[in-house]
Image: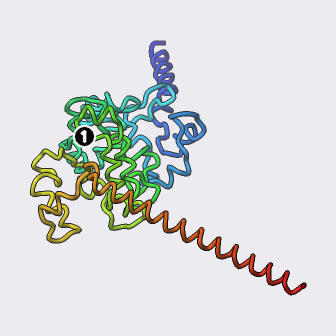
C-alpha cells in the first residue's frame, strides 16, 4: 500500500513538473504570446527577427523570468550578472537582470562603460541620471547595426541620442555643462556638415568617444589639454593650439554672430531684389506687348 502511495505521489509530481522543466525556451515560443500582447511586454516579431539579436533565444538575456506562465523557461543568472543588476536597478526598473546580461556578450564594452563617467554614475553611485545600454541603443529587441540608418547610434543619429540627456536643463545644471551644448554643436561647421549628410563630419563620439566617455577635466579625456590637439589632428593634420581653441561648444562670439546675421540679411535682400526685378521686367514686357497689340488695331 505504501509503495503504491509513493508511486502515485511521484507520478503526480512528474506530471506537474515535467512540462515546466521541458518548457520550450526558443524565441518563437515566447513571441507566440508576447507578439500579440499590448504595452511594454509586446515584441514585434518581424522587427525582432531583423535585429542584431534576432537569432537569439529570449532566455539568453531574460535570466530571471517570474510568474507561473514562465515556469521552467527562465535562464540562470550568474553572481556577477545579479550583482550588476542590483547596481543598475535604480536606472533599469523593469528587468535589470536582462539589462545586466548585455555584459555577458559585450564584456570589453562593459568594462569601458563601467569606468566611464556614465557607468560610474549608474553603477558606482547607483544614480538614475546616467545612461544604460538601452538608453543609447534603444530596445534590445530592435537594435540595428550602427551602419543602419535606423540605428540610434548611427553616425547621423548619435547626436540626437546624446541630446536626450545633454539638452536637458536639469541635467546641465546638476552636472555643470551648458544646456546649449547641443545647440552650439548644431550651429557649428561640424554640426551643419553632419546635418547635410557628410560622412566625414564628426559627431559627439568622434571627439568624446562612446562607451568610455570621461569628464573633459579628466586627463584621459580625448578633449582634455594636449589630447585635444591629437583628437583634432585625426581630421585636421597639424592642428595647433589656436586652431583647437576655436573648436568648442561655447556660444558664438558676438562679432561672428552679427556678421552671420548680416550675411543672411544681405543674401535674402539680394534674392528679394532679383525676384522683384524679374517680376517688374515680366510686367513691363506684358505691358509693352499689350500696347503694341492695341496700336496695331488702330
Residue 148 position, x and y percent, is 44, 60
Q: Is residue 286 left or right of residue 153?
A: right
Res 149 → quadrant? bottom left
Say which residue appears at 29% left-offset and 32% top-offset: 88
Residue 28 position, x and y percent, is 53, 46
Q: Is residue 54 left or right of residue 199?
A: right
Colour basis = rainbow
- Residue 26 appears in the rendering: yes
Q: Tell which of 294 and 242 is nearer to you.
A: 294
Residue 69 position, x and y percent, is 51, 29
Say which residue appears at 26% left-offset and 50% top-offset: 249
Say which residue appears at 84% left-offset and 84% top-offset: 295
Callout 1: 10 Å neighbours few (<14), some, many (20+)? some
The extreme right residue here reads: 297
Q: Is residue 225 left or right of residue 182?
A: left
Disc 1 on helix, strand or loop? Answer: loop
Q: Tell which of 235 and 82 is nearer to you.
A: 235
Q: Tell me if residue 116 comes above or below residue 122 in the rendering.
A: below
- Residue 155 appears in the rendering: no
Res 214 → quadrant? top left
Res 227 → quadrant? bottom left
Q: Tell which of 222 and 49 is nearer to you.
A: 222
* Quadrant, the C terminus: bottom right
Residue 280 position, x and y percent, is 64, 72
The extreme front residue here reads: 298
Q: To which residue does mark 1 refer? A: 177
Say which residue appears at 43% left-offset and 64% top-offset: 266
Q: How many marks?
A: 1
Q: Is residue 97 left or right of residue 112?
A: right
The extreme top residue here reads: 1
Amino acid at each position: 500500500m505504501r509503495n503504491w502511495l509513493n508511486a502515485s505521489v511521484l507520478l503526480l509530481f512528474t506530471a506537474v513538473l515535467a512540462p515546466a522543466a521541458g518548457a520550450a525556451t526558443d524565441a518563437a515560443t515566447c513571441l507566440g504570446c508576447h507578439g500579440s500582447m499590448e504595452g511594454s511586454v509586446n515584441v514585434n516579431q518581424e522587427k525582432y527577427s531583423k535585429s542584431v539579436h534576432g537569432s537569439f533565444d529570449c532566455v539568453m538575456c531574460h535570466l530571471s523570468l517570474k510568474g507561473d506562465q514562465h515556469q521552467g523557461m527562465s535562464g540562470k543568472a550568474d553572481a556577477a550578472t545579479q550583482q550588476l543588476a542590483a547596481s543598475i536597478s535604480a536606472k533599469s526598473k523593469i528587468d535589470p537582470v536582462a539589462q545586466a546580461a548585455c555584459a555577458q556578450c559585450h564584456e570589453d564594452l562593459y568594462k569601458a562603460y563601467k569606468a566611464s563617467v556614465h557607468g560610474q554614475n549608474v553603477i558606482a553611485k547607483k544614480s538614475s541620471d546616467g545612461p544604460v545600454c538601452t538608453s543609447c541603443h534603444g530596445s534590445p529587441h530592435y537594435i540595428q547595426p550602427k551602419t543602419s540608418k535606423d540605428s540610434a547610434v548611427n553616425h547621423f543619429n548619435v547626436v540626437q541620442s546624446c541630446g536626450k540627456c545633454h539638452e536637458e536643463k536639469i541635467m546641465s545644471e546638476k552636472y555643470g555643462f551648458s544646456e546649449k551644448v547641443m545647440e552650439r554643436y548644431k550651429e557649428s561647421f561640424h554640426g551643419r556638415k553632419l546635418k547635410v549628410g557628410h560622412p566625414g563630419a564628426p559627431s559627439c563620439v568622434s571627439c568624446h568617444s562612446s562607451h568610455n566617455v570621461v569628464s573633459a577635466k579628466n586627463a584621459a579625456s580625448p578633449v582634455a589639454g594636449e589630447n585635444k590637439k591629437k583628437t583634432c589632428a585625426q581630421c585636421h593634420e597639424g592642428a595647433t593650439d589656436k586652431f583647437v581653441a576655436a573648436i568648442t561648444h561655447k556660444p558664438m562670439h558676438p562679432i561672428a554672430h552679427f556678421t552671420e546675421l548680416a550675411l543672411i540679411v544681405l543674401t535674402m535682400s539680394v534674392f528679394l531684389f532679383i525676384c522683384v526685378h524679374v517680376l517688374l521686367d515680366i510686367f513691363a514686357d506684358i505691358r509693352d506687348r499689350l500696347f503694341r497689340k492695341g496700336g496695331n488695331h488702330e
